[in-house]
Image (cartoon, rainbow, N blue to C red):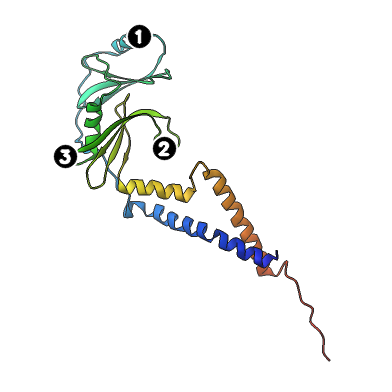
Amino acid sequence: MKLRKFHRFLGLLLFIFVMSSAATGFLRANAKGLYWKDRPPKTVATSLSLPQIGIEEVFKVFGENFSSGNILRIRLEKFSDEPVYLVETDRQDKKYMLLDAVSGAILSPLGPGDALKVARLFVGENAQALLTERLPAFKAGKSGRPRPVFRILFDDRARTEVFVDQETGEALAVLDRGRRFGLWVVKLHELDFWGLGRGALSFLGLALMVLSVSGLALGTGLGQNKKKGRLFQ
């Protein structure tokens, strides 16, 4: 195959990928103005009341309920307007323990009712929950570890769904129509389908380099067959 034909064939082959990359790049650069809306929790900042039990009691409760493992970190946080201790451990099966800082009761794993209270912070007051289901291993983002969560879907216009961690009470992900579209745009831009993202991007990058080199060769006259003209006197 001659260089010119090869260059033309490769250009036509890559046209759809280049256009897709340009379009998704534009959408990602203008995401907040087009479809990605920030959805902060609808809570008013309030002061956190002091805990009624101390750190020593946290270690005591942990030792009484778990035969193995060590505490790595303890954080005082707020859950349902009440102070709680979020205890991080080195256990593989139950990495976190949510402890009521007033009564000393273990709150985790959360039930559907508590998870629904967390999820309602991200939707309007009139939104109704259409679905509440347990997911044993939900991964929020590429770098996150799979976590047991409740998935709660609402009937609002944005079709909001919230993924609430069963052990920490944290909303790991909040999705709506715009955010789902945005995640699809990211996957399309990175060609991240069926686990082929790295290989597909590598192939596309190499193909574009070959296309650039062949275009340079054609532009400078390299690789072309020079026709010898006849001299007429």
Residue lying furthest left: 126
Residue at 70 percent across and 66 percent down: it is 2
Task: Looking at the picture, tell me which residue is in the foreground, 70 or 123.
Answer: 123
What residue is pinned by disc 1?
Answer: 63
Q: Quadrant of residue 170?
A: top left
Location of residue 60 by image quarter: top left
Residue 96, image x, y percentages: 35, 21
Q: Residue at x 31, y 26 (%)?
A: 166
Q: Is residue 215 above or below residue 124?
A: below
Q: Is residue 83 above or below residue 202?
A: above
Location of residue 188 in the rendering, given as x and y in whole percent from the top left corner: 45, 50
The amino acid pointed to by label 2 is Gly
Instruction: Classify mark 2: helix, strand or loop.
Output: loop
For the C terminus, the image quarter is: bottom right
Density class for disc 1 (Cα within 10 Å; few <14, some 14-19, many ≥20) is: some
As drawn, the label of residue 125 is 3
Would residue 197 appear left or right of 213 to someone viewing this image? left
* Residue 109: % across, % down: 30, 21
First-in-chain label (1 vs 2): 1
Q: What residue is pinned by disc 2?
A: 141
Q: Which mark is residue 100?
A: none
Assess whether mark 3 and mark 1 are in contact (beta carbons under 8 angstroms). no
Q: Position of residue 59 (x, y in %)?
A: 33, 11
User: Disc 3 residue type?
Assistant: Glu
* Alpha carbon distance from label 2 to label 3: 28 Å
Calculate the distance from the C-alpha at mark 1 to the C-alpha at mark 3.
41 Å
The quarter of the image holding the N terminus is bottom right
- The amino acid type, in three-letter code, at marker 1 is Gly
Q: Secondary structure at mark 3?
A: loop
